[in-house]
Image (cartoon, grey):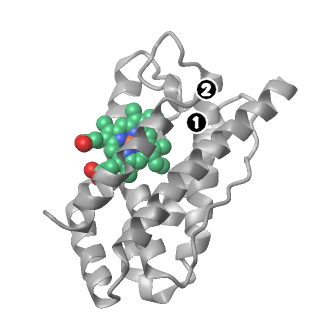
Amino acid sequence: MENLFTSLKQNTVDSHQLLETTAPFNTMLKPGLFSQQSYTANLSILASFHEYVAVKIEPNSEARALTDYLQPELTLGTIKQDLQQLAVPSFAPPFTAPIDSHNMADLIGASYVWMGSSMGAKMLHRWLNQQGYAHLPCAYYAHMSSLGRQWRDYQQCALALAASHTIDHQRCIASANGLFEALIECARQYSARTQNIL
Ligand code: HEM
């Protein structure tokens, strides 16, 4: 599929790599580094990300077809459920990114980061189940794995919207990268704050 999604993948690969190497994301898949505390941090940051994108995308009725794939209510519900079950102190770190609710390029970029994260989630969910972490709640990762089954259909939907709104591809890529940067910043703020209180 030589299209917007190929460009998104190619042009966000560096941001994704930086995210993966930033704490607490860098503890996933690493039994020596992973802990209930890092898992809580991971979910808390993702909760702020999903909340931010949901608030931006839900009011735009023209993006309704996209929102249906993201399932914001269910996604946020599963994260909150997991966080409640984890008996580790956490907080909702602030999340700011340059996404405009009225701009379809921004919303498609945001939906890409959300739906794309289901690719990694599938692997992380499998890892959580295999590595003796059965005591940890993983409703969020189970849910995101199932969202991943809609990946191709979601892409077709986003491409149709991108074409009908003649979106600026460069802006869409910049928005996706902006969200990765915001996730990294959010992770830094979480680490700084928890170092002070724990
Ligand atoms: C916690 C550590 C993470 C790991 C180990 C991880 C791993 C992966 C893997 C294995 C893929 C599939 C690559 C491929 O098939 O080419 C992927 C894709 C992706 N992930 Fe992550 N990921 C992580 C965190 C995240 C987070 C937090 C987000 C965003 C909220 C995210 C967003 C994406 C996106 C947008 C894609 C691209 C999908 C595509 O264009 O094919 N990832 N990730």
Q: Do the residues labelled 2 and 1 touch (CB within 8 Å)?
A: yes
Residue 24, placed above or below residue 7: above
Q: Which residue is the extreme one toward the right?
A: 197
41 or 126, which lies in front?
A: 41
- Is disc 1 surrounded by few (<14), some (14 to 19) or many (20+) residues within 10 Å? some
Residue 175, labelled with which disc? Answer: none
Residue at image coords 63%, 33%: 40
Residue 107, placed above or below residue 5: below
Specify whether residue 142 is in view.
no
Q: Mark 2 points at which residue?
A: 38
Specify whether residue 80 is in view.
yes
Residue at image coords 57%, 79%: 101
Q: Which residue is the extreme one toward the left?
A: 1
Position in image of residue 197 (x %, y %): 86, 27
Quadrant containing the C terminus is: top right
- Is disc 2 surrounded by few (<14), some (14 to 19) or many (20+) residues within 10 Å? some
The answer to which image quadrant residue 3 occupies is bottom left
Q: Is residue 71 left or right of residue 164?
A: right
Measured in 3D between alpha carbons, the distance from the residue under mark 2 to the one under mark 1, in whole angstroms, is 6 Å
Residue at image coords 42%, 15%: 132
Q: Name the residue under label 1.
A: 42
Quick check: is the Cβ at mark 1 less than 8 Å away from ligand 1?
Answer: yes
User: Which residue type does callout 2 highlight?
Assistant: Ser
